[in-house]
Image (cartoon, rainbow, N blue to C red):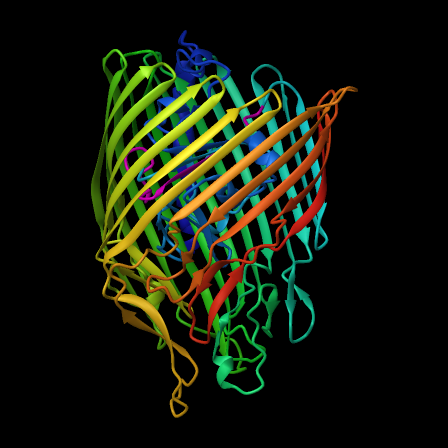
Amino acid sequence: MGTIDRSNELLRLAFVSGASLLALSLELSLTPAAFAQAAAPAQGMTGQDIVVTAQRRAEKLEDVPITITSISGDTLQSANITTVTQIARAVPALRFDFAGAAAQPTIRGVGSALSGPGLYSNVSTYVDGFYMPSPSSLDFQFMSIRSVDVLKGPQGTLFGRNATGGAILVTTAAPSFTPTAQARASYSRWNTFNGGLYASTGLGDKVAVDFAGIYERSDGWLRNIVTGRRDGDYERYGLRAKLLVEPSDAVRFTLAFTHNHNRDGKVRGYNAYEGLSIGTTVPGTVIAQDRGDVSYNGKVDFLLKTYAYQLTGEFDLGFADLTSYTMVRRETGENNLDRDGLFLPYLYSNSQTKYNTFTQEVNLSSKPGAPLSWVAGLFYMKDNNYFPYLKSSTNGGPLVNTPNYGVKTKSWAAFLDGTYELSDGLFFTAGARYSEEKPNAFYGLAAGGRVEYTDRFKRFTPRAVLRWEPDERSSLYASWSNGFKAGVLNPSSFTTVALRPEKINAYEVGYKLASGGIRFDLSAFYYDYKDLQVATFNGVSALVRNAANSRIYGLEGQFSGQLTDQLNVSLGAAYTNAKYKDFENAPYFEQNLDPASPTYGRFANRDGDASGFVMQRSPKFTATANVTYDIPLASGGKITLNANGFYTSTVYFDPTHQFRQDPYAILGLRAGWTSANERFSLGVFGDNVTDAEYRNQVLGGPYSIQSTWGDPATYGVTATLRY
């Protein structure tokens, strides 16, 4: 009954929000305000500008005093970037690490490696303005992604929910009144098929609809070296439908439904990092440690189902624009994991995870063109994420229930941010956000019953920016911003001790230029980062603790330009120097090599001193490149050649530098033909064409140090049909 009651409560909240918006729309439909004017680009913008909403209002990219990497849908397609997590190939200083199916972004050294009840990412992800709390749902793909904007540094004023590292803003296409359609299909190595469809049309002059769907399957590239069987197969599909209703010129509603289904055996395909396994103490044991090799003996896969209902209401109030975002979201995950990574029955687990989320946000923003531009807003979230059941089997025994756990979080915030033109070309921005969170956690006891506990965290996070425009196509800025990530209740470690909130003070200076088809950005930054929450993993428990403090500084540059009518180049590089200033209780793993011990061969968690060490998942140097060259054909149409590359220096997966990935580079190539009417395209592509071998995650465990690998070289063909 508890789950039903919670669901009904969320639905009631959604209904009340929708009814309130409907009443407001009826009132506005009687006013003469024109929504078309409210939705128009800001004054002075042209079709050549890149328009972003990094400050919750439409602005030219070069006018925003934040380091941003903006990637268009066309660029994503030309570089064969089909999932959100692959954007790291095009964004310097961004990493995506995986804890099973959970994708965890890190920007400039600020990020988290783990997921679980109460463990939220330091980098907030928003899709069409909606906050996505679950890291298991970030690795999605759709036909209709219009753009991806990656905001660097703490976004504690406007995108405040744990955005100490930055924010990723994904924008998908809106329904069109003009009929349009696109279909895509590709076939690549390991019998991998990927297909997608997008279609949109108007239903009269007040209503429009669209539909986007994808389907992908693969036999996988893993091989069980004990049985010889191919492994790592996966199948996933997703669909999203939108209904756009414009009852008047001053009102617009967009209702969206999204469903994703993902069954993946690859994400749980761990093997032993450099052979570190309890198997070394058992003569004759086969230990998988090379890329593509696994040696587990149980069923290993992950099943994720998500459902999301989103209502966006946009209203022209005459003096300002009001936008409302209402979301109800459900997620269920099923995990089957061989936790020893051996063809031996040491430890196997079966578990289920659930996320039930309701969010409501309201933004009120000024009209463009006034000396003072501003935005004010309110945000509320109720999130319940937990393990309904957790079963494990040891030494070949039956699956038995182990204590379950979960966290319910209520969060609300109010924010205000404004920019005033002090004099011709000189702008001052000030903003502030007040955030308050109340997590309630529980964990079960082996003897029955459970422990429940709660806490409250609140923080005021301001920012201030001074920006000067030497001319209308360039700007210089200096900023200070404050970031906050709420404290953590971590019931998976079966403790009631709360972690302190993270606090970050960020200072940045930058220069932006956009002129004659050329764009150039340069920024330098310094972070004073305190009480950062450092995470590692041991068995079924997430081990999270506070490092005393750290400091991060660096330099980042981006260049893009249409150098000729046929040649387009984008380059990016980032230098990040991130170190723990004081971290004497850093976690590390030690293998018990005492044959007389009952835990002989296992790995135990210990405390070490990581003071002065480079922070985990913080490579000192990253670089990206994307080059596109069009060759016009005499008969019409064109040939498009694309090369895209990504490089990273050494990455440490833990604070004490036990586990690392040496520098590596990934190169992708693509060649395609497009017909004269641009309705049909054929292409061939290759990803990681040099077959670089690299790990994308290392996690500790009681029976092995678990490692997962990035995809080997992949090649295939693709076709696209447009209408």
Q: In this view, does 706 lie to the left or right of 430?
A: right
Name the spot of residue 47 as percent of width and height, x first.
50, 15
Along the line of sight, the residue nearer the viewer: 640 or 335: 640
Q: Reply above or below: 249 against 303.
A: above
Pick the residue in front: 146 or 634: 634
Would residue 126 be seen by someone viewing this image from the given angle? no
- Going 37% across and 53% down the picture, which residue do you hit? 112
Q: In which quarter of the image is residue 629?
A: top right
Name the residue at the bottom extreme. 596
Q: Does the magenta stretch include residue 210?
A: no
- Picture coordinates of residue 359 (x, y %)? 38, 39
* 700 left or right, relative to 497: right
**Splitting the image into 4 quarters, where does residue 404 fall?**
bottom left
| Residue 571 visible, this orientation | yes
Q: Is the magenta stretch mostly helix, strand or loop?
A: loop
Quadrant (top left, top right, bottom left, bottom right) of the N terminus:
bottom left
Residue at x 50% of width, y 20% of height: 517
Q: Which sits in the foreground, 60 or 232?
A: 60
Decide if residue 323 is on the left or right side of residue 226.
left
**Range of the magenta residues?**
156-175
- Residue 115: % across, % down: 41, 56
Above or below 530: residue 143: above
- Residue at left offset 61%, top offset 29%: 210
